[in-house]
Amino acid sequence: MLNDPRSHGLWEMTAPPAPDTVAFSGKADADVVIVGGGYTGFSAALHLAERGTRVVLLEGAEIGYGGSGRNVGLVNAGMWVMPDELPGVLGDVYGSRLLDVLGNAPRLVFDLVEKHGIDCEINPAGTLHCAVGQSGLDELKQRAEQWSRRGAPVRLLDAAETATKVGTDAYAGALLDMRAGTIQPLAYARGLARAAIAAGAQVFTGSPVTGAERNGARWTVKTARGDVTADWVIVATNAYTVSPWNVVRTELVHLPYFNFATVPLSAEMQARILPERQGAWDTKEVLSSFRFDKRGRLVFGSVGALRGTGLGIHKAWARRSLRKLFPGIGDVAFEAEWYGKIGMTADNLPRFHRLADNVVGFSGYNGRGIAPGTVFGRTLAELVSGRIAEADLPLPVTDPQAQSFRSAREGYYELGAQVAHFAGARF
Ligand SMILES: Cc1cc2nc3c(=O)[nH]c(=O)nc-3n(C[C@H](O)[C@H](O)[C@H](O)COP(=O)(O)OP(=O)(O)OC[C@H]3O[C@@H](n4cnc5c(N)ncnc54)[C@H](O)[C@@H]3O)c2cc1C
């Protein structure tokens, strides 16, 4: 995207085309202006437009330019934080609301895909969180017990069943989560955009918002070639925020994450690795993830940025790791490589912000934004159209808190990933 093959890689090569859009110019009046064209923005736009609300969405680059077009495509339920810990962090009311909302969020993704006929390689076959060693298994046992107690369709697999489902004996077990699945992430973002436009939303790309001004009870947001005036502003810029709501960005530490996509594997390897086509990742701190696309390419990723010395180090690591995990795979070629920035909050939980009167947004999905972005977009639509009150949200209102030593920590993660993946490191 924007002439960078390492921005969206395989997803850009294989996604259906984006709907036709142009840059905004002139003046417009709307009920709601949405800034940012990822899952959060388009889900909000779709749910608002479906109820007849006049919506203008302004995207600074292209549809799915941010995390929504670059991710692994694991449609996860829940967050990193253990279910039992959430009430302690957020209080009982918000803790149980958030668990409920996020536990059911993949269902909304699957339902929207079906309802709008979105062509995005959807596969609700579940996900496998794979245990590395005894400590990984202990963590997954706790997750399994805590989610099962809440009635979630999860199951802890032993090492033998994991080996059959993953195609390697590298793991001590795995947590199978049948609420979850995989999608082609950019295709989903483009499909949501198409559905929002069909419902009546006006979508503009190449239109970065550069400022916002109070205009009586309303807001005027500015782009290089024109202004939109609206009653509400939804800020859906998240980890890819460029001004004017830069506070959203300063609250997040960017964690780089890359993916390599192999050429389509042989029929034998496609039958051996992830035969039921779950999406998978492991319990390591510098984690690895892998999943197939519909043509049988294996998408293999981990923490790191594919630039400078990182490119060679991470590519060599990916080759070594694939051979160690799946010895029959041989010296497989890569067809695409790309990376992006995950926005991490200090406590690994998302945020709801009221940035000013009638200026609201969710952000900080910590690498788990497909289902949350979709469900929080719908929540924002309900909030600004008055169907729910702020007190009913799944998160409390908080002010953005800039994280200290952000740049240093971002540099540390990028370099630390190179150290972790340097020669000798295992999968
Ligand atoms: C490499 C990677 C792997 C990931 N893997 C997964 C995964 O497997 N599963 C999962 O659930 N999540 C994953 N995530 C996280 C997920 O992709 C994000 O949480 C999600 O896409 C966020 O969606 P969003 O709509 O809130 O923001 P984004 O998709 O980032 O969209 C924000 C948009 O705002 C635009 N913008 C910014 N500033 C302005 C401005 N001033 N004016 C106009 N537009 C502006 C940007 O151009 C961008 O398009 C991953 C993320 C990355 C980067």
Image: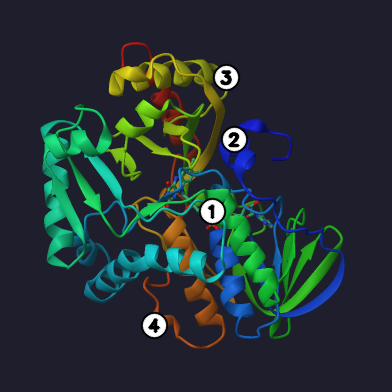
Q: Which mark is residue 120?
A: 1
For this view, does 108 lie left or right of residue 174? right
Label 3 CB sits under 8 Å from any ligand 1 atom = no
Q: Residue furthest top?
A: 423
In whole angstroms, how far apart are the C-alphas of marks 2 and 4? 41 Å
**What residue is pinned by disc 2?**
9
| Percent coordinates x, y for residue 374 in the rendering | 48, 65
| Percent coordinates x, y for residue 219 in the rendering | 71, 76
| Percent coordinates x, y for residue 1 in the rendering | 69, 40
Q: Are marks 1 and 4 in contact (CB under 8 Å)?
A: no
Residue located at (61% from left, 60% from top): 191
Mark 4: few, some, or many residues within 10 Å (few <14, many ≥20)? few
Q: Secondary structure at mark 1?
A: loop
Q: Nearer the viewer, residue 346 or 286?
A: 286
- Disc 3 marks a residue whose amino acid type is Gly
Residue 119 seen by the camera:
yes
**What residue is pinned by disc 3?**
308
In whole angstroms, how far apart are the C-alphas of marks 3 and 2? 18 Å
